Image: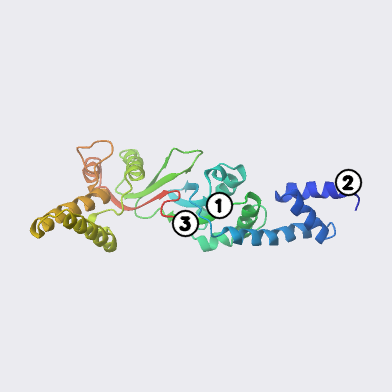
Amino acid sequence: MSNKELLDSIKKLREMTGVGFKDCKIALDETKGDLEKSIEFLRKKGIAKASKKMNRTASEGLALVKAKDGKIALIEINSETDFVAKNEDFINFCKELSEINFSNKGDLDKLNETKMANGNLVKDNLVSLIAKIGEKITIRRANFFDDLNGENFSYVHSAIDNGIGKIISVVKINGITRGKNDEIGTKVAMHIAASNPLAIDKDDIDNSIVNKELEIIKDEIKNSGKPDEMAEKISKGKISKFLNDNSLLNQIWIMDPKKKVSDILKENSSDKQLKILDFVRYKVGEGV
């Protein structure tokens, strides 16, 4: 192969894979100029590169929501930096994953084994993208809301594109009458995005979270030197406030501080009492 042919092949391989000049030349040397085998060689090398990146923290990225025929799917894909989250290849990858996630009803195992538009599996394209971009990228979590028993509503905070942002919430409400009181659904989704409730009602909050909070409250009061009797009374008041602040129905409504979410649901009920059945809130990188 002449120098010109080699340079042309390197250029083609770089365009096809996004991999650097040196790695492309090594691949072509190893495969005696065969482009297809070179791509395979680089993909295998990409797997090795990707595995080295897996101990890094990926707390940036994007959350995406896809709604169709009353059903809604959410997915979060993480990267290490916000710079990559703005990368066109990363965004296009996320958009296609959002479509696949909807089709697979939020099942990440199925999603990873699904073929993408280029004919490769999601899990293989993920490895290729990691090798190309040079950062850890993870498909973190997904959810799906069917169209049974209630109406679904979503909200994207500071959307960078249709259905794409850093904070996304979805809520399912029973009792909605389309054209009468459906606007309240989006407002409740907005409230969830802003107020980050842990559960629908106080009794739904995980006991381990409540017990841990109570432990912290009691230790704090004891360390302040308060008598035991007073400490017990204060801790009851504080845990009650914690439960109200973190349960959706008991939270102060973001659009009217004189009312709770439960009050708003009653006020906006039409043919049937509104009832929140389920909700999900994604904030990119939260808890990573």
Give the number of the disc on residue 4: 2
**Sequence-earlier tag: 2 or 1:** 2
Residue that extends furthest to the right in the rendered view of this protein: 2
**Sequence-earlier tag: 1 or 3:** 1
Nearer-the-camera pick, 188 or 25: 25
Q: Looking at the image, which residue is at 52% across and 44% down?
A: 82
Residue that extends furthest to the top in the rendered view of this protein: 256
- Quadrant in the rendering for residue 38: bottom right
Residue type indicated by callout 2: Lys
Residue type indicated by callout 3: Arg
Give the foreground label among 3 and 2: 2
State yes or no: discs 1 and 3 in contact (Cβ < 8 Å).
no
Q: Is residue 97 left or right of residue 172?
A: right
Position in image of residue 127 (x %, y %): 62, 57
Is label 1 in a helix, a strand or a loop? Answer: helix
Give the number of the disc on residue 141: 3
Is label 2 in a helix, a strand or a loop? Answer: helix
